[in-house]
Amino acid sequence: MSKSPANYRPETRLVHSGTLRSQYGETSEALFLTQGYVYNSAEECEARFKGEDPGFIYSRYSNPTIAMFERRMIELEGAEAARSAATGMAAVTTAILAPLKAGDHVVASRALFGSCLYVIQDLLPRYGIETTLVDGLDLDQWQRALRPNTKTFFLESPTNPTLDVLDIPGIAEIAHKRGARLVVDNVFATPIWQSPLALGADVVVYSATKHIDGQGRCLGGIILASEAFIAEHIHNFMRQTGPSISPFNAWVLLKGLETLGVRVRAQTDTAARIADVLASHPKISRLVYPGRADHPQAALVTKQMRGGSTLVGFEVKGGKAAAFRVLNELKLAKISNNLGDAKSLVTHPATTTHQRLKPEDRATLGISEGFIRFSAGLEHADDLIEDLTAALEKA
Ligand SMILES: *Cc1c(COP(=O)(O)O)cnc(C)c1O
């Protein structure tokens, strides 16, 4: 018998896991761009609907290309089950909202992607779900926020954009003592550098739009968890409400997974080199890079991550005006709010991704007017360093 892909190392699983070959024996995964399926008989159709025949019914529920993407992610992440979604936000919203009802309580780290913060702060309370935001770095705040009706803890680590690293095992333990679950948004770490389920989390969510596509083409998301969590909370919610991914996008993401390991490694090496150059640059007042010894949670990075980050955060002296000059002077790195792309992208969080926040909340999170987030792409590191140092000269 051949080895199951789940027994191979992650790089091998990224290429082979989940492949379903049609009768034509194609090398590359087929794109099943179909809404529905036809049946050989009314009896077969009945059996399919009763769940006695395991085939596909309708692409809002599933589709062979989507199933391949989910299977590959399951085996990479070490999960039991997964459901993909149209966007990262469809995955996050479903993972948080689907298991809850009015009267439940959610605790989340304050340092969140803007739309995740909207779901926690604005959306859930409208449906009678109470929420508390905490400083995710402070375990006592998670502990004190617990209530008898607390059902879910939610966090991302490293955080956007300041790249703080939260103690996933420690926070999971606090949640589990009270029977709550921990949901982790693992976008910044990627499945290459961090496996939240192995660290004690119950649910992992991704915006596949970022590193998993990694070439700026399409949006997508995925929820990974135990078979029981997906069956009880996610399966029916997604079937009936329909935040489904398009088979075309699932196919792009599936092919993206084949190169995820090499891309993330190369982008991380480049980001680390950029961080080392910027750390001693006279125009820079603060440099954050998970993987450097001067990262504020360096010990935690070593404990729970296998590598650093494709992102670098830094603060230019001279506030917004200086930061804008750097962005405008960059020739190679493009101004964008996206990340994880083959093309290096640079973001000014205070005026874009985090402009909705009150100035005092931005200050609490360390998002100053001079703070820049740099997402390292696949260009030659020397070209990017020359581009950055030339732009900083003008700051
Ligand atoms: C981009 C992002 C999301 C949302 O993903 P979309 O695919 O844009 O919907 C959620 N969380 C984090 C951390 C992200 O970076």
Image (spheres, rainbow, N blue to C red):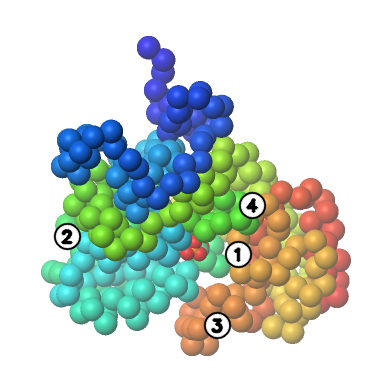
| Left or right: residue 135 compared with residue 353 | left
SS for dot 2: loop
Q: Which residue is mark 4?
A: 215
Residue 167 in the image: state x and y as whole percent. Answer: 39, 56
Of mark 2 and mark 3, the one earlier in the sequence is 2
Instruction: Please name which of the two marks, 2 or 3, marks the residue nearer to the observer.
Output: 3
Viewport quadrant of the N terminus? top left
- Within 10 angstroms of label 1, few (less than 14), some, or many (20 or more) residues? some
* Circle number at residue 178: 2
Pointer 3 with pointer 4, Cβ within 8 A? no
Q: Is residue 156 left or right of residue 182?
A: right
The residue carrying mark 1 has its beta carbon less than 8 Å from ligand 1: yes
Check disc 4 and report its element: helix, strand or loop.
Answer: loop
Q: Are marks 1 and 4 in contact (CB under 8 Å)?
A: no
- Quadrant position of the C terminus in the picture: bottom right
Q: Is residue 358 above or below residue 63?
A: below
**Residue 382 seen from this side:** yes
- Circle 3 Cα neighbour tier, 10 Å, few/some/many (<14 / 14–19 / ≥20): few
Residue 376: horizontal and vertical position, in percent?
A: 68, 55
Q: Is residue 251 depicted above or below 60 in this figure?
A: above
**282 or 236: nearer the eye?**
236
Q: Nearer the viewer, mark 1 or mark 2?
A: 1
Q: Name the kind of residue labelled 1 in the image.
A: Asn
- Residue at the disc numbered 1: 338
Label 1 sits on a secondary structure element that is: loop
Q: Hey, what amino acid is under mark 3?
A: Gln
Label 2 vs 4, first from the N-terminus: 2
C-alpha distance separating marks 1 and 4: 11 Å
